[in-house]
Structures are given as structure tokens and as C-alpha cells.
């Protein structure tokens, strides 16, 4: 029956992936009359350049993007590295971002069944219930603008490993390399995974059981992550900082924004920081809340012993919640506690509200364990809660589906520019990203669109948007314009053309409102 639960959850994820994204989104190619937008465009550019570039050291450096690290471009190295081996077999203009969305949606319910089995609950119906619930977790569905952060299956797999590590040390042989894979999906997910894995030796210690082997295993998992970071060039980069700006609000788990049934009570995210509340969005879902309440009513006496049995996990989740709340704790639209400046190392965790995700999934598994332990009646209630969660998540799936099927048209003359990009030996965009005036979002969006179009046939480019850099780029457009184009160089200037007096001459012409010089 457990195998049937895995099969059903896999089928559920596959059907959702195909319905929500569409095959042309999952398996892209060059020459389409539409384009991905937002962060998805950045991720596609990064993977296309990485797949077409030569192998380098560190392995994630992308030479045609100024040696930017693929991880800092959110290019999902865990998928990009094997795809690079297959690059000669892939269609022109292919990138794996759509494939990762499909992987994430397929593995999300499967990983939920895995975590539930690790907690000791088997059987088809409990497995189907958590598969439905996990596939409709609001924080999971709502991450669709950022491919790598849709990988919530990483958290569920690590939670399942935590339970198994308490019983059998051999699972550390899986957990250690898994921690490296988690890092190569996204560092935030890797830190959440490490917290869950490290909870295993802490639980054993607090139980008074042997914990040395588990402690060594957790240390090896941390070492594997740090080793990959060192070898793959993660160290030495800096970002914008801003810890606390995108924190968890105390009301977020209760705030039913995007709920089908209760959403009318919450027309927007709850926010006390002035930054929108998006990263701190952690509504648990109506079905999960119903399961938690039902579990407390039907099996409340099992809660305290269960918490004591997994005290290491409880402490790890409390620590993650504290990081998610940050040093400026918001309740509704107000800051109710300000602890002052945070330690500098926390500035790396700008979107701290994300760290509540493992807490939500642990609550889901805990509620399922409580209800499944009450026999047939509990399983029926659990299944009803899973269906409720799935139905209540309808507006979020509709929003994702609309985004994935937006098929935004090109705003530049794509058919005229494609042969120019293909024939070029190098492409220079003006203004480059660091030269775009602060607040000029239109120019940034246009530059990203041109980079996306040029990435169909990747050539070295002079600029790129990245969240982090080892050496932040500086504005050098004046020096570029003071020198003649190199042989094979194509220069593309955004309007207004008066800003680029060097873009003139017999080799220049208009392409819509752009100026292109060969």
C-alpha cells in the first residue's frame, strides 16, 4: 500500500506540473514568440550561458557572463551540471528552469509521503492525504516566481531523513551527499536541511541515547556543504543585506491571504516592515489548520510525549522561527519588539521569513501522525483535511497557472535581432546594468529582455544581473564608448539615443527604438 501511495503522489505531482506549466514551458527552445519574465528570465539566461560555455574552474563560473557564479544567478547548479554533460543533445536555446519546476511539483507530494513514512505512518490513505496537503502548501505554491525556491521537497526529504537517522545511522551515507545537493539547489534550502539533519544527534543526546555517530554524521554533512561551497566558488561574494526587512510576521501563519474560503478577510499580505510581507508569507492553509485542531482534540495526550521524544527537532524549529522573525518582530502592521541591530553575519539572510518553511512541514507531519494514530476515523479526518487544503489552495494554483501561461510577447524586434546576435562574436549592451539609473525599472526590464533574447545563442556579453558578486561590477560605459568596437562585436543601445553619442556611424542603424552597431 505504501508503494501505491508513492505512485499516486507521483501521478498527482505530474498531472499538476503539466496542467500548471504546459509542455512548452517545461521544455523550451529558441525562436519562440513569447518569453519568460521576472526572475525566471534571469534564471534562463544563466543556465543557457552555463550550458553553452566551456568547463571552467571553479565549475560554476560562467565565462560568457563575466565569470559570474551560476549559483549567484540562481541557475540551480544541481540540475545545470548534469544538463551541461547532455548539452550537445539538447535543442538550441534550451534551459532547464522549466524542467526544475516540473521536478519540484512532482517530488513535493512524493517527498511528503517519504517524510510521513519516516515518522512511522504507512498506508495509502494517510500518504495520499499528506501528498494533497503538501502540494497545496501556500508558501510552496506562491514561490513560483523563483524556480530554485520551489524546491520545498528538499525540506521534506531532510525531515524524512531526520526520522530515519534516529533509528539507523546508515542513513548518514544518504544525508551527507544530500546536503551537498541541497546546497546546489539553493543555499537557503541547504541551511534549512542542515538544521533538520543536525536535530538528529541533538534529539538522541536529549533522550540520553548514544549520539556520537549521529554527531559525526551531522558534522560530515556540514563539512560536505562547506567543501562544496569552497570548491564551487561560493565564498567571497556579497549581497545587499537587509536582515529583518523580509521577516516573518507573527500573524503570517494565521493570515489567510489567497485562501479560497477565508481570503476575503485578508486582501493583502500582512506586513509591519514596509517591504510588502511577501517573503514572510507563511499562511499554513485551511486544511492544515483543521488537521492541527482535530489532532489536538482527538489525540492531545500524545502531543507532549511526542515533543519530548523529538526535543532536538523542536529546538531546531524554534531556532529557525527566531531567525525568521528577525530582530524586529512584527504583529500585524506594527513592530512590537525591536531588539536593535542584528549581528553582521545575519545580513546574509535578507529574506529571513523563508526559514519558517520547515516549521510548517513539521506541523503537517505532526498533525498527520496524531490523526493516523486514531485509527480509521482519524485517517478519514486526515484525508478530509488534505482535500480541504487542496481545494482552498485553488486561487494560488490559478495565479501560478496564469503566470506560467502568460506567454508575454517580446517588446523588442526579436526576429530582426536574432540573426545579429547569432552572427556576433560578442554583445555589448548600453547602458550596462551598473550604469542604469536607480529607480529606472523600465531600463532594467528591457535590458533583461535583451539578455534573454541574446542567450538563445549565447555569446560573451558585457553585463548581467546577479544577486551577489565576488567583485561588484562598476559603470564603465564611458570607457567602452570611447573605444571603437572590436572585430565581431555588436553594440546595442537602449533609448534615449542621445545618451550614447558614440553609437553612431555607418555601422549603426535603428532596430525599433534601439540602436545597433556592428
Image: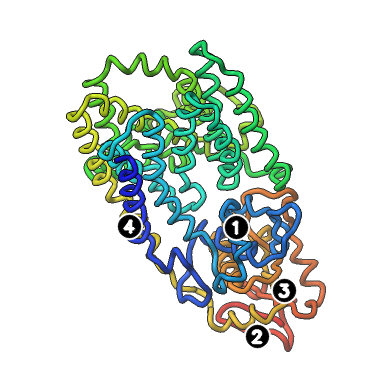
Tell whether label 4 touches label 1 (CB within 8 Å): no
Q: CA distance from mark 1 to mark 4?
A: 25 Å
Vertical placement of residue 515 versus 167, above or below: below
- Residue of label 1: 82
Q: CA distance from mark 4 to mark 2?
A: 48 Å
For marks 4 and 2 on the same chain, the one whose residue lies earlier in the sequence: 4
For marks 3 and 1 on the same chain, the one whose residue lies earlier in the sequence: 1
Vertical placement of residue 19 versus 511, above or below: above
Q: CA distance from mark 1 to mark 2?
A: 41 Å
- Residue of label 2: 509
- Residue of label 4: 15
Q: Look at the numbered disc 4 and give the secondary structure of its residue.
A: helix
**Left-right relation of 207 to 7:** right
Front-most of residues 441 and 110? 110
Residue at screen point 22% across, 42% down: 261
Vertical placement of residue 164 versus 299, above or below: below
Between marks 2 and 3 in the image, the one whose residue lies nearer the viewer: 3
Residue at screen point 29% across, 46% down: 393
- Residue 267 visible here: no
Return the residue found at the far left. Answer: 377
Between marks 3 and 4 in the image, the one whose residue lies nearer the viewer: 4
**Left-right relation of 279 to 15:** right
Label 1: how many Cα within 10 Å (few below 14, some 14–19, many 20+): few
Q: Position of residue 475 (x, y in %)?
A: 73, 59
Q: CA distance from mark 3 to mark 4?
A: 42 Å
Q: Which of the image's four quarters has the C terminus? A: bottom right
- Residue 123 visible here: yes
Between marks 1 and 2 in the image, the one whose residue lies nearer the viewer: 1
Residue at screen point 72% across, 86% down: 507
Q: CA distance from mark 2 to mark 3?
A: 18 Å
Q: Which of the image's four quarters has the N terminus? A: top left
Where residue 127 sits, quadrant-wise, is: top left
Amino acid at each position: 500500500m505504501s508503494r501505491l501511495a508513492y505512485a499516486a503522489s507521483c501521478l498527482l505531482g505530474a498531472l499538476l506540473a503539466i496542467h500548471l506549466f504546459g509542455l512548452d514551458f517545461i521544455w523550451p527552445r529558441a525562436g519562440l514568440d513569447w518569453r519568460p519574465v521576472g526572475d525566471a528570465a534571469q534564471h534562463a539566461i544563466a543556465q543557457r550561458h552555463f550550458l553553452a560555455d566551456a568547463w571552467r574552474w571553479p565549475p560554476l563560473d560562467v565565462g560568457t557572463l563575466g565569470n559570474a557564479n551560476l549559483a549567484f544567478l540562481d541557475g540551480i547548479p544541481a540540475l545545470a551540471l548534469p544538463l551541461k554533460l547532455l548539452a550537445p543533445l539538447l535543442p538550441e536555446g534550451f534551459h532547464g528552469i522549466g524542467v526544475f519546476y516540473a521536478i519540484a511539483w512532482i517530488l513535493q507530494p512524493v517527498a511528503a509521503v517519504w517524510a510521513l513514512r519516516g515518522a512511522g505512518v504507512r498506508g495509502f490513505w494517510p500518504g495520499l492525504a499528506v501528498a494533497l496537503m503538501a502540494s497545496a502548501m501556500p508558501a510552496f505554491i506562491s514561490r513560483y516566481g523563483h524556480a530554485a525556491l520551489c524546491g520545498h521537497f528538499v525540506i521534506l526529504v531532510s525531515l524524512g531523513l531526520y526520522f530515519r537517522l534516529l533509528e539507523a545511522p546508515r542513513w548518514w551515507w544518504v544525508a551527507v551527499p544530500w546536503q551537498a545537493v541541497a546546497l546546489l539547489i539553493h543555499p537557503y534550502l541547504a541551511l534549512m536541511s542542515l538544521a533538520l539533519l543536525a536535530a538528529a544527534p541533538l534529539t538522541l543526546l536529549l533522550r540520553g541515547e548514544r549520539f556520537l555517530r549521529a554527531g559525526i554524521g551531522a558534522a560530515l554533512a556540514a563539512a560536505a556543504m562547506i567543501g562544496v561551497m569552497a570548491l564551487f566558488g561560493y565564498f567571497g561574494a556579497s549581497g545587499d543585506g537587509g536582515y529583518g526587512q523580509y521577516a516573518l510576521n507573527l500573524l503570517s501563519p494565521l493570515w489567510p491571504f489567497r485562501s479560497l474560503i477565508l481570503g476575503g478577510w485578508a486582501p493583502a499580505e500582512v506586513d509591519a516592515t514596509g517591504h510588502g510581507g511577501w517573503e514572510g508569507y507563511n499562511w499554513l492553509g485551511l486544511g492544515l489548520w483543521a488537521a492541527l485542531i482535530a489532532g489536538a482534540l482527538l489525540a492531545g495526550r500524545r502531543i507532549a510525549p511526542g515533543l519530548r521524544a523529538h526535543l532536538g527537532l523542536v529546538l531546531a524549529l524554534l531556532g529557525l522561527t527566531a531567525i525568521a522573525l528577525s530582530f524586529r518582530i512584527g504583529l500585524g502592521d506594527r513592530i512590537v519588539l525591536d531588539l536593535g541591530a542584528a549581528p553582521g553575519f545575519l545580513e546574509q539572510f535578507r529574506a529571513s521569513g523563508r526559514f519558517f518553511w520547515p516549521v510548517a512541514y513539521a506541523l503537517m507531519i505532526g498533525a498527520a501522525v496524531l490523526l493516523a494514530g486514531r485509527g480509521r476515523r482519524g485517517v478519514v479526518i486526515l484525508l478530509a483535511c488534505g482535500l480541504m487544503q487542496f481545494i482552498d489552495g485553488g486561487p494560488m494554483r490559478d495565479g501560478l497557472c496564469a503566470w506560467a501561461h502568460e506567454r508575454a510577447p517580446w517588446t523588442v524586434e526579436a526576429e530582426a535581432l536574432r540573426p545579429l546576435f547569432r552572427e556576433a562574436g560578442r554583445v555589448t549592451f548600453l547602458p550596462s546594468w551598473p550604469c542604469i539609473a536607480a529607480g529606472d525599472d523600465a531600463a532594467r526590464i528591457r535590458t533583461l529582455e535583451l539578455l534573454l533574447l541574446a542567450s538563445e545563442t549565447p555569446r560573451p556579453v558585457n553585463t548581467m544581473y546577479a544577486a551577489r558578486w565576488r567583485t561588484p561590477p562598476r559603470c564603465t560605459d564611458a570607457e567602452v564608448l570611447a573605444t571603437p568596437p572590436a572585430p565581431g562585436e555588436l553594440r546595442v543601445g537602449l533609448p534615449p539615443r542621445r545618451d550614447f553619442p558614440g553609437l553612431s556611424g555607418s555601422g549603426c542603424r535603428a532596430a525599433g527604438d534601439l540602436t545597433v552597431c556592428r
